[in-house]
């Protein structure tokens, strides 16, 4: 088969199972998918000239059964592959026709389409960064641009849960040597007294307890990528040493004399500094050195239709990992997900979808399961009786500062736990089950720190 003009797939069917199969394959292979569910849409799709592979469901109830038969003959002038399911229509010889039983295609569709569709390159950031919004497309393009410059440090900015490590891994995948390591470290999780040794390594006897030489994270990353997550938590006394290592592209182990070249790509991430360098907790010279190239991630609430795409992907991943029967999100469940403001961003969405899948215990994840997972009552149906309680007004949902009821509950809980812990940040974070950095950000936002 000739090299395809573009990665695209057309499906003409009104079978939900075949549609879900094609959608899943298109997402995994990063190809554009167009679906015709009516005879009018099928005719329009048949007359188009852009799709590389077309799947025609010839079942009696399929829209193609009523579509313009003349359009089929137009394919003789196109370089395209046609898959006919339960074929009853003989095609012109100049068109490649593959005939499959519908049941066989439903069972082996991934393999069948995989032989015709160009697979998404493992070196394309879209392979890891899911989304179709303008913000995601911009991030993917930025990753492609900067990936070829391995000496340039990259700073990824974004709210908690937006997927900063996903972007770091995409940078690594795009241009790292084969089998090069990806080393990630949470800067907030390492005690300040051990950080220098963890980062640079140490020689035997360099400090009490150093019985043998040990390479640090810089050496472990080798020719791969070192990801410094929550870099804003980096100890102040270590920042000048990291700055010098980045500027000279070399370093020494603690207690060592030998200079070791820094060959790894440095990618760092923080949810601080979203309003500019002076909002950063890092010293300015280090901030600018880490931010040789900056990639800023949009919060999920600004990513439009990505919620549905990500939710379906998370549910498919849950099913695949746990070897359960196929599951899908009902339309009402998707509406509830789309209406949520996602303060925890993509991480929160994944947790909500997986909790809802556990609650469902069936093929359909519906609005009740998602609402329970979100910790709220299921929304009323549009045709149900209106609520008798007329005291619930828009004003009752917010406080004087415009904070929503759920946000107010969260704020009161966080402040109460912080007070009960005698303002011990570590103790309060353990009680609430959130990272110290996340709790610190919330307390600062609430004016408690």
Image (cartoon, rainbow, N blue to C red):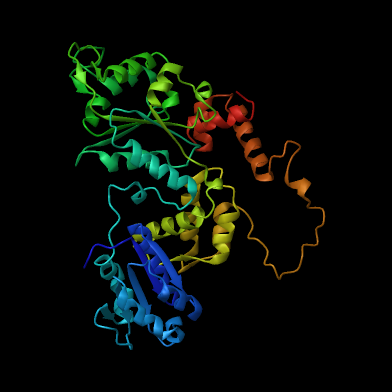
- Residue 411 seen in this snapshot: yes
Please determine whether, in this image, residue 129 is positioned above or below residue 156: below
Q: In the image, residue 39 lies at what x, y percent? A: 48, 81
**Residue sitting at 36 percent across and 40 percent down?**
143
Residue shown at 28% from the left, 63% from the top: 4
Quadrant in the picture for residue 268: top left
Q: Nearer the viewer, residue 167 or 376?
A: 167
Q: Is residue 33 above or below residue 206?
A: below
- Give the left or right position of residue 363, taking residue 116 as reference: right
Q: Is residue 296 left or right of residue 258?
A: right
Q: Quadrant of the C terminus?
A: top right
Relative to the observer, which residue lies in front, 91 or 88? 91
- Whole-percent x, y for residue 108 in the image: 28, 72
Residue 25 visible to an observer of this rendering:
no
- Quadrant containing the N terminus is bottom left
The spot of residue 368 in percent (x, y) is: 58, 62
Q: Is residue 43 depicted above or below 387 in this figure?
A: below
Q: Residue placed farthest to the front in the image?
A: 77
Residue that appears at 21% across and 32% down: 223
Residue 170 higher or lower than 420, as above or below: below
User: What is the total number of numbered labels drawn onto the structure image?
Assistant: 0
**In front here: 312 or 208?**
312
Percent position (x, y) of residue 213?
18, 19
């Amino acid at each position: 088969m000739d090299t395809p003009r573009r990665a695209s797939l057309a499906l003409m069917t009104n079978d939900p199972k075949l549609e879900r199969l094609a959608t899943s394959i298109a997402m995994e292979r990063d190809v554009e998918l167009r679906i015709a569910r009516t005879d009018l849409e099928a005719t329009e799709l048949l007359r188009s000239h852009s799709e590389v592979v077309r799947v025609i469901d010839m079942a009696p109830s399929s829209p193609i059964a009523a579509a313009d038969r003349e359009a089929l003959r137009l394919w003789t002038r196109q370089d395209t592959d046609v898959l006919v399911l339960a074929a009853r229509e003989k095609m012109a010889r100049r068109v490649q026709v593959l005939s499959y039983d519908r049941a066989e295609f439903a069972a082996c569709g991934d393999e069948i389409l995989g032989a015709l569709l160009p697979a998404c390159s493992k070196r394309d950031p879209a392979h890891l960064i899911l989304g179709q919004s303008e913000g995601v497309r911009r991030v993917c393009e930025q990753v492609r641009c900067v990936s070829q410059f391995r000496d340039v440090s990259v700073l990824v900015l974004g709210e908690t849960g937006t997927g900063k490590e996903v972007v770091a891994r995409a940078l690594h995948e795009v241009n790292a040597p084969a089998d090069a390591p990806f080393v990630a470290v949470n800067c907030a999780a390492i005690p300040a007294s051990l950080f220098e040794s963890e980062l640079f390594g140490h020689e035997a006897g360099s400090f009490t307890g150093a019985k043998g030489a040990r390479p640090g994270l810089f050496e472990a990353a080798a020719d791969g990528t070192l990801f410094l997550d929550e870099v804003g938590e980096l100890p102040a006394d270590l920042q000048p040493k990291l700055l010098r290592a980045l500027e000279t592209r070399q370093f020494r182990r603690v207690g060592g004399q030998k200079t070791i070249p820094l060959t790894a790509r440095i990618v760092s991430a923080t949810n601080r500094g979203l309003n500019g360098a002076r909002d950063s907790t890092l010293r300015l010279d280090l901030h600018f050195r880490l931010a040789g190239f900056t990639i800023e991630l949009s919060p999920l609430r600004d990513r439009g239709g990505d919620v549905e795409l990500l939710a379906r992907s998370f549910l498919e991943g849950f099913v695949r990992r746990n070897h359960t029967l196929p599951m899908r999100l009902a339309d009402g469940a998707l509406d509830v997900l789309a209406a949520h403001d996602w303060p925890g961003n993509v991480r929160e969405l994944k947790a909500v979808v997986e909790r809802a899948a556990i609650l469902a215990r069936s093929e359909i994840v519906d609005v009740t399961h998602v609402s329970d997972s979100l910790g709220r009552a299921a929304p009323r149906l549009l045709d149900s009786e209106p609520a008798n309680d007329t005291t619930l007004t828009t004003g009752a949902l917010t406080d004087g500062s415009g904070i929503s009821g759920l946000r107010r509950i969260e704020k009161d809980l966080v402040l109460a736990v912080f007070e009960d812990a005698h303002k011990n940040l570590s103790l309060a974070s353990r009680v609430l089950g959130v990272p110290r950095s996340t709790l610190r950000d919330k307390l600062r936002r609430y004016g408690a720190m």
